[in-house]
Image (spheres, helix red, strand yellow):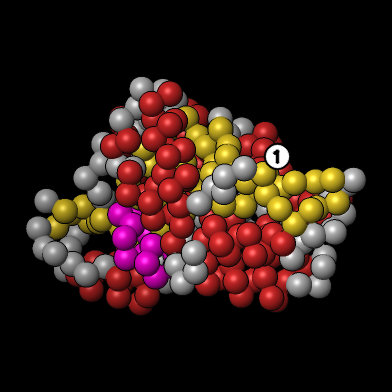
Amino acid sequence: MNIIILHTQDLVIANKMADAVGVRFESQASHFRFSTDKEIDIAPLREALDVDINYLPAFDFSKAGLFVSDMDSTLINIECIDEIADFANLKAQVAVITERAMQGELDFSASLIERVALLQGLNVEVLDRVYAERLKVNKGGKALIQFLKTQQIKTAVVSGGFSYFTQRLAQDIGLDYNRANTLVIEDNQLTGKVKGDIVNATAKAEFVVELCAKHQVSPHQAIVIGDGANDLEMMAVAGLSVAYYAKPAVLEYADIVINYGGLDIMVDFFNKSL
């Protein structure tokens, strides 16, 4: 029996979907559930109804032990490097490279080195301005993290961006772990370089495995969420992958797709009685 989750409380939308698929539904506190023996293509339904719809995946949510999120354009609303570049009047140039890297068209590490080099000479205060003035946690993000805490699930953010932002974000919203690249700073200016090995797709996957080992959690009990091609490797090692307003390659791969709602619709999967 397949269970399809309609991530809305709107009864009108639920009835439209019931008419479209010929399946009855039951109402939950935050969503509707449809049980069916049919194989229903839910992609066109998402577009027709402008709402998130997902199959309940073959993942034991009661045994989830780790949640790892990408940062830029997933847990937060911006690509930090693009916003930093804006202070050098290079946002458009850098954003094009960022987009191509997220689509998987460019080698991530090489593209990061290229973009960071363009930041050379900027005063370190621009990092604080980006965090304070432009960075926001995406809708439902804080609520999701607080819910995961009630489930005793460890939480982390990992980014091909910068530790300045992951560290502050982790502290502000209560994440257990964070990892990202460290910008080299001299005389209160960015040098245009990063310190040590770059946190690329492989490093992200290794971080997930590392945290699983630390907490004696099987990777099959890990949930990973992201939006770009450099998230695919960590999705592959996790038991459950989630695409959030993602690039086509990620949408195609992920077990769960969020294209319309907030991050907190993840709560719908945990308990049928919620």
146, above or below 255, in the image: above
**Total labels drawn:** 1
Left or right: where 44 falls relative to 146: left
Q: Report if residue 13 is visible in the image.
A: no
Q: Residue at x 17, y 63 (%)?
A: 23
88, above or below 201, in the image: below
- Nearer-the-camera pick, 153 or 68: 68
- Nearer-the-camera pick, 175 or 88: 88
Query: Where's residue 46, x and y in %?
Result: 35, 70
Left or right: where 141 falls relative to 37: right
For residue 52, which quarter of the picture?
A: bottom left
Is residue 251 in the magenta section? Answer: yes
142, above or below 34, in the image: above
Query: Where's residue 191, x and y in %?
Result: 79, 53
Q: Residue at x 82, y 68 (%)?
A: 88
Q: Secondary structure at mark 1?
A: helix
Q: Which residue is mark 1?
A: 168
Going by the numbered disc 1, the residue's amino acid type is Arg
Residue stretch in magenta: 244-259
> Is the C terminus in the top left, top right, bottom left or bottom right quadrant?
top left
20, above or below 60, in the image: below
Query: Where's residue 104, x and y in %?
Result: 45, 67
Q: Residue at x 26, y 50 (%)?
A: 56
Left or right: where 79 falls relative to 224: right
Query: Where's residue 31, x and y in %?
Result: 37, 52
Is residue 58 in the magenta section? Answer: no
